[in-house]
Image (tube, rainbow, N blue to C red):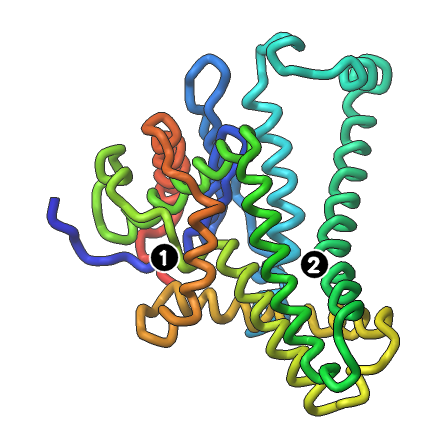
Amino acid sequence: MKEKTVHKTSVGGQALIEGILMRGPKGAAMSVRLPNGEIETEYKEVKPWREKNKFFGLPLIRGIVGFVESLVTGYQYLMESAEKSTQGLTEEEENLSKVDRWINDHFGEKMMNIIGAVSAVLGVALAFFLFMWLPTFLVDLVTQNHLLKFHALFEGILRVIIFIAYLAIVSKMKDIHRVFMYHGAEHKSIFCYEHGLELTVENVRKQKRFHPRCGTSFMFVMILLSILLSSALILIFPGLASINRILWICVKLLILPLVMGIGYEFIRYAGKHDNLFVKILSAPGLWMQRITTKEPTDDIIEVGIASLKAVLTDNPEDDAL
């Protein structure tokens, strides 16, 4: 089929447990494959945080706000999809452990929410350990005094290696692999719409699964930017190379909002342009999507189409960036 005019939209998505969430300028639509085989789609009128306050919509600031919003709302949708995808199943079919069943029977939903919150905190702690503390600690073990000015560079390279290794390991897990298949369907569905094609399984299947506006690319861009900014700080202020490493980690945390802001602006720019500059800087993130996205089956593609159609139906067709 011949492609029509390309649409550039602000539609983005998120892979869920047996589902996909599509976000548009006016709201979001979540489609989940239920245990009985049906697809349940729910449109949610959600006002982005950046529209609630003009300050939140300023360049650089909107990247920080968007990142925090994605973490908060993304976790909520993930838990909701997990609940929907197991509706009607017996406890044996849900593979609940005896401990899970005991907690649910004796303490109910409130305790399960608390456990979910604790899990989120532990997840943040793990990310801090792997990507902030561990690279600094390991580089300190091997870096000589005359190489201190390259500390941030070595640390950044090690962080990239740890990040890739972590994703490669978790992608081997059965449940995560399936989520990555939904991630691929999300990208393919968006590409199909942007290319002006009818949203059918056949058309979506033909599309690429690597999208420049992906969260994986955003994370990789953030790592690269943190390397550049950290290295620049040491060149401008050489004394930072020899300060206490706890203070150095604090410095990196302080520049993190700036990294998020710049990273968001680049991903936003990359979504609207296809020049050589964008291709070069997007290449590492697109390559990483070979790990974080997998080729979806037709039934998974159907979920992506349902979600995208729902979010487009309730939004103006000219919702371009």
- Residue 30 vs 87, above or below: the answer is below
Q: In the image, is 115 to the left or to the right of 127?
A: right
Q: Where is residue 206 drawn, in percent x and y?
A: 24, 42
SS of the residue under disc 1: loop
Q: Where is residue 217 drawn, in percent x and y?
A: 49, 59
Q: In the image, is 74 to the left or to the right of 105?
A: left
**In terms of image quadrants, where is residue 78?**
top right
**In terms of image quadrants, where is residue 129?**
bottom right
Residue 54 visible to an observer of this rendering: no
Q: Mark 1 or mark 2, which is nearer to you?
A: 2
* Amino acid residing under circle 1: Thr
Q: Which residue is mark 1?
A: 9
Q: In the image, is 214 to the left or to the right of 296?
A: right
Q: Which residue is mark 2?
A: 131
Depth order, front residue of 259/9: 259
Residue found at x 81% / y 88%: 239
Depth order, front residue of 178/203: 178
- Residue 253 vs 235, above or below: the answer is above
Q: Earlier in the sequence, mark 1 or mark 2?
A: 1
